[in-house]
Amino acid sequence: MRFKLNGIIPAMVTPFTKDGEQVDYAKVGPVVERLIGFGAKGLFVCGTTGEGFLLTPEEREGLLEEVIETAGKRVSIIAQTGAAEYWTTLQLTEHAAKAGASAAGIITPFFYRYDDEAIYNYYAKIATAMKGFPIVLYNLPGNAGNFLSPALTMRLANDFDNIVGVKDSSGDMSHLSMLLTRAPKGFQVCNGCDPFGFQSFVAGACGAVSGTANVCGDLYVKLFDLVQAGNLKAAWKAQMKLVELCDVLQYGRNLALFKEAMRLRGIDPGYVRPPMRELTKDEKKKLEAALRAANLL
């Protein structure tokens, strides 16, 4: 079982046809190529930025297959297979393994509030069923409503060989630091919060899974490479630009902002799916002006 989280991994957007009726498969390939062209080391498919929880299981499977077919072996493909309940998560994880994904990224079960033992049992059951297939834990308590504590994360990491890493989107640098301090050898801690990408890399995070990288993957790759080269002054300047972009994009509160920004940078990512809404003409003008003011166009 060889899988390594490393570098910048865009949490890829999902192109939809008008009004979000269908996945726009004709646009998936060009989006994949653009993100790989930015220097991405992997793609995170059907995650939060990818509107994965607005897709049916069948759509999630079809989208993953399209991404894998386009990307080939050039980059790692992490399929976000988490769902609100175990059986759909297992179905999607089994499909990801058969389709040729590099790993599954699995968000905590959501909506209901679960204690640590329930969450442990959920992941333990999946890891046991998928023995030999890499699993990356996905901690996003602000959306999922359930928190993967450092103690619970380390318990899972130590108990199951195929739980190989965590994408931490807690938004808490102290939590991320605790994970880095306690991680057993070989367990990979990946940042999921763009506003402190620089800090996470300096602290030892192996990379970042990033929604903002759909728009500015080139900037984020540069930031990561500068940190690895020890050029921290230049890396910090890149981080400040990344923070500015996060502010302009309202950090994903409306994913239509991400898609319009991508369109302004020369790639058509399609539409969003309701209840997401498209931008108004005025919002589009303001976004373009903000990106130009920030020298991002």
Image (cartoon, helix red, strand yellow):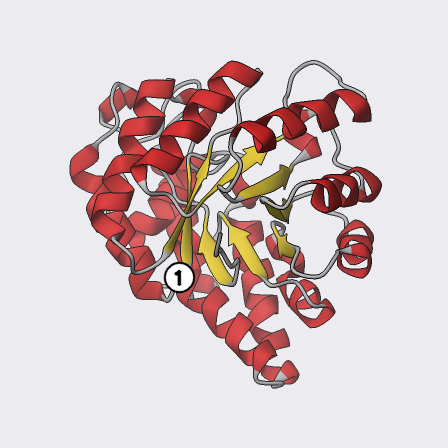
Tell me what residue is drawn at x 75 percent, y 53 percent. Answer: 176
Along the horizontal axis of the image, is 64 left or right of 219?
A: left
Q: Which residue is mark 1?
A: 40
Tell me what residue is drawn at x 15 percent, y 38 percent. Answer: 26
Task: Using the rendered image of the protein, determine whether residue 133 is visible from the camera's viewpoint.
Answer: yes
Determine whether 43 is above or below 93 in the image. below
Q: Closer to the camera, 94 or 245?
A: 94
Tell me what residue is drawn at x 42 percent, y 28 percent. Answer: 94
Q: Position of residue 183 (x, y in %)?
A: 75, 56
Tell me what residue is drawn at x 26 percent, y 27 percent. Answer: 23
Q: Closer to the camera, 45 or 241?
A: 45
Find numbered disc 1 in the image and state the secondary structure of the residue it sits on.
loop
Residue 203, by quadrant, is bottom right
Determine whether 239 is above or below 161 in the image. below
Determine whether 287 is above or below 89 in the image. below
Q: Closer to the camera, 155 or 246?
A: 155
Which quarter of the figure is the C terminus placed in?
bottom left
Q: Position of residue 182 (x, y in %)?
A: 81, 56
Residue 269, by quadrant, is top left
Along the horizontal axis of the image, is 181 left or right of 109?
A: right
